[in-house]
Image (cartoon, helix red, strand yellow):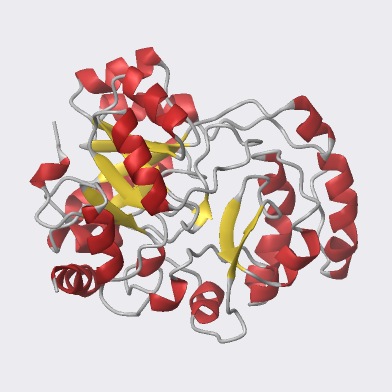
Amino acid sequence: MFTLSELTLPIIAAPMAGGASTPALVAAVNEAGGLGFLAAGYKSATAMSEQVARARELTGRPFGVNLFVPAVTDPAALAAVSAYRAELRPEAEQWGVSLPERIAPDDDGWDAKIAALLADPVPVISYTFGLPTAQEADALRAVGTTQVATVTSTAEARAAAALGLDALCVQGPEAGGHRGTHQAAAEPGSESLLDLLPLVRAAVDLPLIAAGGLGDGPGIATALRAGADAVQLGTAYLLAEEAGTSAPHRAALADPPFAETVRTRAFTGRVARGLRNAFTDRHADHAPPAYPEVHHLTAPLRAAAAGRGDAQHLHLWAGTAFAKARPGAAAEITERLWREAQE
């Protein structure tokens, strides 16, 4: 089974659902000595398997696949979705968009993805938003897959360790995109990554991957000194040539008016960090903690915004170190980050 000690460079490209993570990005980070990750979230099991096959064509090195763990939405949060729909309706009418009146339950194809990864194992799987069942973890262990849990607290870390998982991705509040709390309605802890790492290290005896706000060499070096065995970066790769980042998202990352990030539930119902824009300002205080229901509710609005290149109404996920992201080939970005860390 794969271990973090096998990496030439202790740098992992974070799985970024929604299109940014691509097989080409995985391969480029791998060839530089790091570990690339595919993001299976929001994809069908078939689409996930197609990307796995493409990644194997591009790299002979180990790579990972990230899964979103499904959960049942709290009934109170679910009941509040209709009020949020009413709040969004004027914008939908303005842009000629229809909002879904009924949102069917969605487990992100969990069972089909687990079945596919058991039939055709990959070296590493990471989990976001929760943990697999003991039976699922045992089955994946039996086919030789290394399993990594995303955790945001010592309680989540202990639960992952009790399940026998192999490593933890410790995610601080500085991370871009969704905070990986195991309950959608949970308010994430406020400890910084550098404060959270030693707490988790004291709670469990597992290899740790540090994630959140690491955008340059000094940040990487500090996280490794704080007890991490490897680091995971996402925002640093958003401008990479191989990333599938949308044109409006790329432009916003380099646009002075987008000067800060905020935590918001406005786009998906889960706490996530992205560039502050008109949508987050207008709706940050009103979205219920209903995931993935709010994600599906706002999807037509976001698709329309993307079509017209309107970054003010898009989810522009980015971590606190977004200003340090630089364009270029992913292998060069990886090598530069490690060189800076060593310096």
Query: Where is residue 296 drawn, in percent x and y?
Result: 69, 46
Q: Quadrant of residue 328?
A: bottom left
From the top left corner, tell me how far across and down residue 315 is, in percent. Answer: 61, 63
Residue, x 69% and y 74% (percent of image)?
Answer: 312
Quarter of the image that includes the C terminus: bottom left
**Residue at horizontal 22 percent and vertical 29 percent from the top:** 145
Number of marks drawn: 0
* Residue 40 or residue 209, whichever sits in front: 209
| Residue 36 in view | no
Q: Is residue 151 left or right of residue 283?
A: left
Eyeballing the image, is 183 above or below 263?
Answer: above
Q: Is residue 328 above or below residue 75?
A: below
**Quadrant of residue 113 within the rendered picture:** top left
Q: Residue lying furthest bottom in this view? A: 256
Is residue 70 visible in the rendered structure shown here? yes
Q: Is residue 98 left or right of residue 306?
A: right
| Residue that lies at the very extreme toward the top in this rendered image | 135
Q: Residue at x 71, y 64 (%)?
A: 280
Residue 173, horizontal then vertical, whole percent? 50, 52
Indicate the position of residue 201 as horizontal and vertical percent values. Answer: 29, 36
